[in-house]
Image (cartoon, helix red, strand yellow):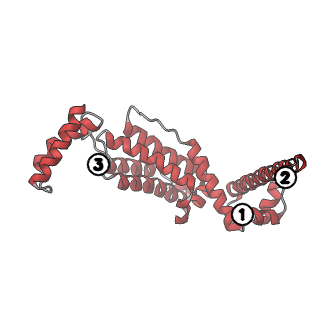
Amino acid sequence: MPPRSRIRDGAAAVESDTAAVGREQARQRVIEAAADLLAREGRDAVTTRAVAVAAGVQAPAIYRLFGDKDGLLEAVAEHGFATFLAAKHVDPDPKDPIEDLRAGWDLAVEFGLANPALYTLMYGEPTRTASAAFRAGMEVLKGRIRRLAAGGWLRVDEELAAMLIHATARGAVLTWLSLAEDRRDPALLTTLRESMVTTVTNEEPAVRDAGPAGAARTLRAMLPEQTILSGAEQDLLREWLDRLAADG
């Protein structure tokens, strides 16, 4: 390629990258302006004209960036999920996994109470669960649940536990926000949280020793009491459990 052609192509690439950066900066500025309007004045205040003025852009720019007002609100909701995800603290080895569960639940509720309009936008419509940040947040929750299961603390199936934990936190916030201020009793939140903990976890770990070996020993000890498996199936499972238990 002749030198001049390479220079022109390089300049075009730089110009394209600069335009992309400028577009993303404008997009972020509009999202933050919309989120601020939402927090201060409510959803009805988030009009394309008001957001454009607050963000310092022309109204047509919002349509180019988001398609329409619904697209803008989707982006604001995604911004909310990302903000919440950034606030989550992940301890890969908590000393007390049940207290870790309580702390995660409290964090979710506190975020909702501190950001009522944003939270309502995020969780008021089922389609919001398609958000990448929402799914990442659910993976954090599933990690907490997996640690409970590995320690023998989990009373229900992992998938059901995730739904129960998420549903009680979401329901707690939306119910609280629907109440008149003089009817908001903190006992509502505490009771919902503790009901969730009681439903999802055991008072004592079902597995004395954490890890596959401990779980295998516990299951092996319980095998004679169950009748679902045939004799041959029990013998095969017992063989597998013996191997796992021996590793511990």
Mark 2 neighbour class, 10 Å CA radius: few under 14, some 14 to 19, many 20 or more: few
Residue located at (22% from left, 40% from top): 216
Per the image, the residue denoted by label 2 is: 12
Front disc: 2 or 1: 2
Q: Position of residue 209 (x, y in %)?
A: 26, 33
* Amino acid tagged 2: Ala
Per the image, the residue denoted by label 1 is: 66
Q: Secondary structure at mark 1?
A: helix
* Amino acid tagged 3: Arg
Q: Is residue 64 left or right of residue 118?
A: right
Position of 230 relative to 218 (above/below): below
Quick check: can you spot residue 207? no
Q: Position of residue 207 (x, y in %)?
A: 24, 38
Front disc: 3 or 1: 1
Contact flag, marks 2 and 1 (Cβ < 8 Å): no
Residue 155's disc is 3
